[in-house]
Image (tube, rainbow, N blue to C red):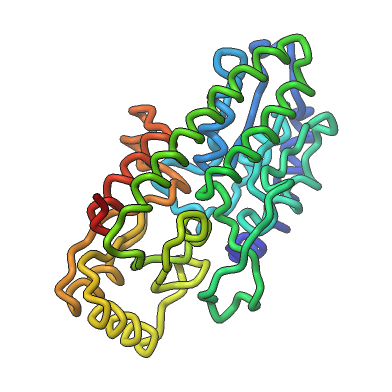
Amino acid sequence: MKKAYLIIGAVVLVVAAVLLATKAGPDRTSRSNKIIVITTIFPLYDMARSIGSDKAEVTLLLPPGVEAHAFEPKPSDLVKISEADIFVYTGKFMEPWANDVLKSAANRKLIVVDASNGVKMISPVVHDADEPVGSPDPHIWLDFADAKIMTMNIKAAFTARDKEHAVFYEQTAAAYAEKLNELDTSYKATLGSCKSKELVYGGHYAFGYLATRYGLKYLAAQGLSPDAEPTARDLAALVDQIRKDNIKYVFYEELTSPKIAETIAHETQSKMLLLNAAHNLARDQFEQGVTFYEIMSKNLENLKTGLECR
């Protein structure tokens, strides 16, 4: 997540020149009357496109197939932000580059949505060496109650920008929130009947919120960053725990190499299942219009198998 700081200075200088040359900012005479919305990661994109429906043009800044924590904004990304009506990000802990980027945006009418506003954040129990203890876990969308707060934060920006259709946005946001309620109900019913309560994840620490909400013990091989390699000692301890508790499944994450999960599974003769944190989609999924609801429903199927739920 910290790599982006290395390029911010250069990006800002380049974009400043581009924006001056193009007189950046929303140009209503040369584009549609739809609200132009830029979102940083897939859950925000899914929320915004559902709320805006046919009244918004929503763009996912993160290219399909790119791991979210490794994303670095390009000059063209800053141009997109400067030309937008609404910019939605998770918060400074998920997108640490956002504050510097927004300072350079030429569009002073841009509505900026920190989707984490009002969310009570938690700290992970596993830390990277370069992350101070107590750094909040930014994966707030994996608690569906928090995801509803994020949805309402985005809805508020739509209604502020387009008061004429405020009732419409209230309705679409409520419909999206109801889908989140459905997920929450299904997760509670399914995960409350599991033989195992230990969720072993051979990836970075992404599912702390989900585990906390549904009473699971969460064991992750890495800290908050997918770039952090676990030590041999950490892996040995995790393998010993799996053997001791007779855990039969190890979950792996999306869009990154599953080599750590594969190593753990090989050492413990356990099986592997995907658990998708929904930071982003693969290109084919994006083109197919896969939704956050669908990803989380598939996750529940895999959790039901992996935790041996009735």
Determine whether, in the image, residue 246 is placed left or right of residue 117: left
Residue at image location 42% in from the left, 35% down from the top: 293
Residue at image location 51% in from the left, 75% down from the top: 126
Residue 287: give x, y in percent of width and height.
Answer: 36, 29
Q: Residue lying farthest right?
A: 108
Q: Quadrant of residue 242?
A: bottom left
Q: Residue lying farthest bottom?
A: 233
Residue 91: give x, y in percent of width and height.
Answer: 68, 51
- Between 20 and 256, the residue placed more toward the observer is 256
Determine whether, in the image, residue 289 is placed left or right of residue 78: left
Residue at image location 50% in from the left, 40% down from the top: 42
Q: Quadrant of residue 41?
A: top right
Residue 150: give x, y in percent of width and height.
Answer: 64, 40
Q: Residue lying farthest left?
A: 269
Residue at image location 50% in from the left, 35% down from the top: 180
As displayed, is residue 71 above or below residue 226? above
- Between 183 and 78, the residue placed more toward the observer is 183
As displayed, is residue 111 above or below residue 221? above
Give the quadrant of the N terminus: bottom right
